[in-house]
Structure formats: structure tokens, C-alpha cells
Amino acid sequence: MKAVYTPRHLAHDVTRETFLGESIPAHEVVARAESIRAALEADGGFELVGPTEHGREPIEAVHDPGLVRFLEEAWPAVERERVARGALIADTYPSRPMFEGMSDAVVAARPEPEAIGGRAGWWGLDTANPIVAGTSDAARGAVDVALTTLDLVLGGERVAYGLCRPPGHHAARSMAAGYCFLNNAAIAAEAAVRATGERVAILDLDFHHGNGTQQIFWRRGDVFYASLHGDPRRIYPFFLGHADEVGEGAGAGENLNVPLPAGTGDEAYLEALERALAAIADRPGSLVIVSLGFDTYRDDPICDFALTTPIYHEIGRQVASLGRRLVVLQEGGYHLPTLGANAVSWLRGADGRAGVSRP
Ligand SMILES: [Zn+2]
């Protein structure tokens, strides 16, 4: 199987994040992607290829150009404004009640702030998006990885894997969030629709709800979004991911959220997966984008499911049994010691290869 990787992610070298107001060691770190790359190389069944540049056009087909501009300008502004921090993390966000009673037109006319702290809040959701000098370039590299993976599949590969970092599924049209800056899967899905004229399905198997992907395609009938995730009543992103969010307008019925309880294990997860796969099989189209996270693993430090390494092989096998072309893109997963083995397990399953027995 071809796997797309670029060292450009190394420039997004984040060491700290803020959690409930406290600065803690970052979870979304360089070592994540490097451990997966090492496991793919050690397996021997993957051919690593570099991405090709796709420019900003496919990005701005999905994202507000202002978000792309902000990411480019953020670190130079930090240096210009002499913000004495290792990373830019906003602490003031435009929460909805701030505008209560004001008309949509008046709210929409509020100008983007000038100070970089204000801009980071304007274009962000939360404090899990530390921006450093190389963040913009790394995010652009991850998009190129995703689009190159799509190119491989459009060029005849049945399945290909993009080792995207930073991840993307929390990033909405005009908002970075939860370690994500640009929505790699959404950008690939939009490009796939434009290239094929077909309907496309996105299957989100990260532990968290992909609020950004849902938002981007909320009113779209040509992109079906299905997500299995920790129930937002207890889990980030807290405000979206409920089962009654089904899309609106042309997108009505084209959004499937399957929130799951704490402790969800292999068997319960496979049952939920069956629902999502059946919904995809019911719809036309030949291509599925998979937002793949391994934060569903039982020892993940920030999540509460209980999946095991062998089950990833079975999940990959079942997703491939849809008989559709698969563009598999990396999202989350934070238990470094098993990240590589879990990725290899999933991808071998999707590739029709036997699983490997590992502890
Ligand atoms: Zn996640």
C-alpha cells in the first residue's frame, strides 16, 4: 500500500498545550507521526511517497481565506508584537451570548481584531491549538498529503494512506480547533467531488466527533458524513456530535452521528461501525474518505474507549469490505507506544493482509 508522508510536519513542534487553564505537556506532538512512519517502514508492506504541492485553491474551496491568511500571519505577528510566549494560544473567544439580542447583520459586521491574541480567538474555538513558527507550513503540508493520497486513489490505487499531521477534523470553515488548523479530510472530500462528480462519503473513526467536517458539509447533499465518537455530553468538542444532528437543507439526512458511552469496547464498537457502513452502502458513490484516529485505543491518555490492537485489523477489513476506494487519512491517537502497531494493524486489514500478533 502506498503511504504519503512529509517531514514538513516536524516544523509544527509543539511542546505544551493548555487544559482546563493549566499548561501541560502537549499530546499532539511530532513523535506521533514519526512513530507511525517508523512502524510502516518496519512492516515492509508500505511504499512511502512524498506529497505534491496543491496550492491554496483546494483549501479555499473549503475554508475561509481569512483563516488561511491568519495562519500565515500569526507567527510573524507574534514576533512583531513581542508576545513573550513559546506558542500562540488565545484566551478570549467570541462566545455566542456576547452577541445575544444583536441582529445577524450587525454581528456579521463586527471586524476581525488587530491584536494577534484577539485574532487567535476570532479564528479559533479553544486553547488546544498552539501556533508556533512552523504551524502554517505544517498544516499546508498535511493538506498536500491528503490531496496526494486522493490523487493516488483517483489514479487507480484501491486504498492509500495519508499520514496527515497536524490532524484536521475539528477545523471548520472559519475556525481552527482541537489540534486542527485545516480540515484535511474535508478538503480531500471536496476535491474528490469536484474531480469525480460523484457523491462522496466520509467515515470518521477518530474518538472525537469531527465537528469541523460536519459543519463544512452540513447543508450538502453530495457529501455524506458518518462519525462514531465519544458522547459530547462528556467529551470534547462538547457542543456538537449529538445523534439528532442530521444535516439541513440539501444535507438533511446526510449526517450520521453515533455517540458512544465511556468504556466502549471492541464488540460495541463493531456494532456501531456496522450502522455507519450500512448507511454508506445505501448511498451511491465509489469513494470513501476515512478520518482515522487511534484515540479509541484502551490506553489512550485523553480518551475513554477500550479498543484493542487486533480489532483495528478487523475494522480496516470491514471498511474495505464496502468494496469502495479508500482514502485513509490520519487524525488523532495519543498513546505513543502503540500508535504505530495500531496503524499497521488497521491498514493491513484494509489491504487484505493478515494481522500481526503483537502484545
Ligand atoms: Zn480525536
Image (cartoon, grey):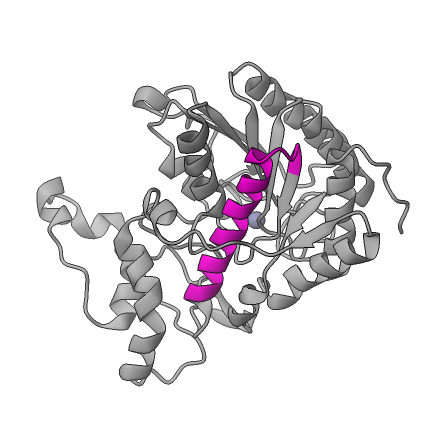
**Residue sitting at 72 percent across and 61 percent down?**
35
Q: Where 201 sits versus 5, above or below?
A: above
**Is 323 left or right of 217, judged from the image as shown?**
right
Q: Nearer the viewer, residue 165 or 310?
A: 165
**Is 268 left or right of 248, judged from the image as shown?**
right
> Whole-percent x and y of residue 303?
63, 50
Q: Nearer the viewer, residue 262 or 339?
A: 339
Q: Nearer the viewer, residue 233 or 137?
A: 137
**Residue sitting at 40 percent across and 24 percent down?**
222
Quarter assignment of residue 328: top right
**Residue sitting at 25 percent across and 67 percent down?**
118
Q: Where 137 sits versus 145, above or below?
A: below
Q: Where 113 sits versus 277, above or below?
A: below
Could you tell me if residue 20 is visible in this image? no
User: Does 153 appear in magenta?
Assistant: yes
Q: Quadrant of the N terminus?
A: top right
> Whole-percent x and y of residue 55?
39, 54
Could you tell me if residue 182 is visible in this image? yes
Total marks in image? 0
User: Does 336 appear in magenta?
Assistant: no
Q: Nearer the viewer, residue 115 or 280?
A: 280
* Magenta part of the chain: 136-159
> Whole-percent x and y of residue 138?
49, 63
**Residue sitting at 33 percent across and 45 percent down?**
173
Question: Residue lying furthest front in this view?
Answer: 155
Q: Main secondary structure of the magenta part?
A: helix
> Whole-percent x and y of residue 36?
71, 57
